[in-house]
Image: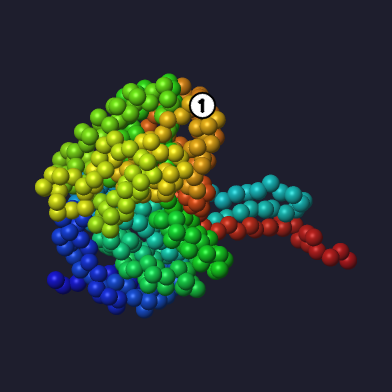
Amino acid sequence: METVPIFVGGVWREGRGPRMESRFPADGSLNTVMRAASAEDVEAAVQAAEQAWRDPAWRQRLPHQRAALLLRVSELIDAQQERLAQLQTRDNGKPLAETRALVASAAATARYFAAACETLEGELTTPRSPGIMTLSRYEPIGVVAAITPWNSPVASEMQKIAPALAAGNAVVVKPAEATPLLALELARLFEQAGLPRGLLSVLPGKGSVTGEALIRHPLVKKIAFTGGTETGRHLAHVAAEKLIPASLELGGKSPTIVLDDADVEVAARGICYGAFSSAGQACIAGTRLFVHRTLWQPLMARLVELTRALRLGHPCQPGTHVASLINEAQRERVMHYVALAREEGGTVLCGGGVPSDPTLACGPWFEPTIITGLSNQAQVCQQEIFGPVLVALPFDDEPALIAAANASIYGLAAGIWSRDSARALRLAEQLEVGTVWINTYKTFSVSTPFGGYKQSGLGREKGRQGLKAWMQQKSVYLATAPGINHWSD
């Protein structure tokens, strides 16, 4: 098979690294072949980016002109939504219903940051000296590195590319090795929309080679990463050594809480979706369930019933709830944790193994699994599994609940189910997480900042904060009369 080109400094060409493949997770069939980006490709991309963002034709482009480009990209995505969703499904195996939503989200992200870019204002600060006007303005950082995950590529990539370009930067994207296709397709759409050459590069390859060369390049002035906490910690060290900003959206072990006044049916359905959509391959998945003891039996009975009814199937088959995991290695990881839970004394209420359906034998499927009988200190309650595994624990009082929910190195998200909104809000204030959903789960708004506490990350994406995160602030002092604060005669 002929190799497909990568996007280096605004030029489509063959990478200079080793051969790499994109495969369809559902059956392992080959999508395409390419050559990875080498360290030489990284050098070429960064040098082109440095030249492009400093070009007056880009530096002096007004915000509404950058906004117009992003709007054109959003229109191109909307016009090709089904094709892009099919491509995303081929790349990472998510059901089409989910990838359609992700593609729509990418278009919405481009539109939002077009608006945010056009309406972003500087600040005329309160003067503290007579005859001195003080103001603050936002300027681009320069060349930025965006490193994206395999579980939701098109949405994650646009959440970095759109605000970075809206802010006036140049972006070098390193997509996950397993899922390079959507980042390359976004590059084509930006090129079609008229983005000047060099402002965007897409460099598929291994993190240890391509990614490492990118983050350590002296001209790269910011690192943005979505992925695992261990890798994020390494990137934070590199950023600290270079004294550059880093935004890191990392792992999670999100608690979901069912209070004693919750609607059992609403809670059970929301918990099932929060834990098992995307086959549990989401950093925000609600994988630690705390249920008030008075609702334990009815809630768990209904949750097990709903989980057993989930349809495992081909991602392109209508009605599929749960598709395969990304690859066999990920399934082995999930199986390891389920075995570990059993060793620690846990009881598997449903799932816990490979499905017996012969039509699913060709891919790395794993049954949605619910485990009880463990303490909050068990390894499966503390470590991110990244698969369809939910651990449920009863609780009796709110102080103990809050302590248990917060007893984690992670702090990405949480869910609360209650009929009493005021009570739920009071509880939300005490949870050490970046996002709290009340009587819903995994709903998003691009206008609302997203990020984590503790080892779930640094910084925020989305919202106006998500635009300013790609800029640096400059203060200006203007004397309105000559001789202000000069030496007196």
- Residue 445, how many percent across, how many down? 39, 40
**Residue drawn at point x = 47 percent, y = 71 percent:** 216
Residue furthest toward the left?
358
Vertical relation: 56 (above or below) 319: below
**Residue drawn at point x = 47 percent, y = 63 percent:** 235
Q: Nearer the viewer, residue 60 or 219?
A: 219
Q: Nearer the viewer, residue 271 or 80?
A: 271
The answer to which image quadrant residue 7 occupies is bottom left
Q: What kind of element bears circle 1?
A: loop
Residue 245 visible somewhere in the drawing: yes
**Residue drawn at point x = 33 percent, y = 29 percent:** 300
Colouring used for the render: rainbow
Q: Nearer the viewer, residue 201 or 326?
A: 326
- Residue 102, how many percent across, how many down? 29, 47
The total of numbered circles placed on residues is 1
Q: Amino acid at mark 1?
A: Asp
Where is mark 1, residue-wise?
Answer: 397
Vertical relation: 465 (above or below) 29: above
Vertical relation: 177 (above or below) 450: below
Q: Is residue 474 left or right of residue 223?
A: right
**Residue drawn at point x = 51 percent, y = 40 percent:** 406
Residue 108 visible somewhere in the drawing: no
- Residue 134, how many percent across, how many down? 67, 53
- Residue 343, how many percent across, how many down? 36, 46
Name the image quarter holding the N terminus. bottom left
Name the image quarter holding the C terminus. bottom right
Q: Nearer the viewer, residue 172 or 255?
A: 255
Query: Badge 1, how many Cα within 10 Å: few under 14, some, many 20+?
Result: few
